[in-house]
Image: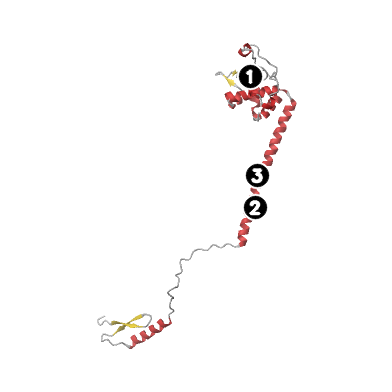
Amino acid sequence: MASAAAVGAVATGTFTALVPTPGDGTTTQAAADETSMSATLAASTMKIPSNAHAIGTLAPVSYSAPGFSAADEHLAALGKGSDLAAQLAKQLADEQAKQAEQARIDAIVAQGGLDGWIAEALNILDLPQSLAPSVKKIVMAESGGNPRAINNWDANARRGTPSQGLMQTIPVTFKHYVAPQLANRPITDPVANLTAGISYMIANYGLDTVEAGGRSNSSGGYVGY
């Protein structure tokens, strides 16, 4: 604008209002009215105490009612109870399976004969009954299933310590490897002889040799131990 109005400052007590004035320095009526209104507004404005604290950023508030907490605990207890029931059921099933297997072994042992002796020996040695066919193969190759078999022609016999029994063990081997609870039995006792022979093979050739039915040569033929 060509005739720019000068801006005058009017003190109101709480703030200063800027009021335009004519170029000649006199205050117009409109300016006076505006000054009066500004003073009124300033007087009615509430001052913020100097010791007031600023309000920080609002943070999300989680709500947890006692009822919900109790429900969560109840669900957790149900879960634990379900897990415990499953564990107990598994333990019961395992125990029943173990008892059934023992009953089967006892029945074989009661029938006697080679199968019964092998079952009893494996049971004493805490070995799986799945080894029975492999052990039987070894026995048949060593003694033909005769618990009183004695080898009177090999090198052991020439040294005066013939191989004897189902597994054809010599006395020193039998004494060292027989199951402790059967140590008072003779070398020709079928079960005691089996425990000694099986233990000797595992100690010297490994369990896999027993599982394979004994040692074998390149052509697959049985080799004594």
Asked if marks 2 and 3 touch (Cβ < 8 Å), the reply is no
Residue 87 circle label? 3
Crowding around mark 1 (Cα neighbors within 10 Å: few <14, some 14 to 19, many 20+) is few
Residue type indicated by callout 2? Leu
Left or right of 111 in this view: 175: left
Q: Nearer the viewer, mark 3 or mark 1?
A: 1
Earlier-in-chain disc, 1 versus 2: 2
Residue 169 shows up from this direction: no
Q: Quadrant of the N terminus?
A: bottom left
Residue linked to disc 2 = 78
Question: What's the coloring here?
Answer: secondary structure
Q: Quadrant of the C terminus?
A: top right
Residue linked to disc 1 = 172
Residue 156 shows up from this direction: yes
Earlier-in-chain disc, 2 versus 3: 2
Is residue 126 placed above or below 30 in the rendered structure?
A: above
Q: How far from the left and from the top, in percent, is residue 187?
A: 68, 20
**Relative to the observer, which residue lies in front, 1 or 33?**
33
Left or right of 172 in this view: 56: left
Q: How far from the left and from the top, in percent, is residue 194?
A: 66, 23
Residue type indicated by callout 1? Val
Q: How far from the left and from the top, in percent, is residue 43?
A: 41, 83
Is residue 145 placed above or below 83 in the rendered structure?
A: above
Is residue 91 placed above or below 149 in the rendered structure?
A: below
Crowding around mark 2 (Cα neighbors within 10 Å: few <14, some 14 to 19, many 20+) is few
**Relative to the observer, which residue lies in front, 165 or 60?**
165
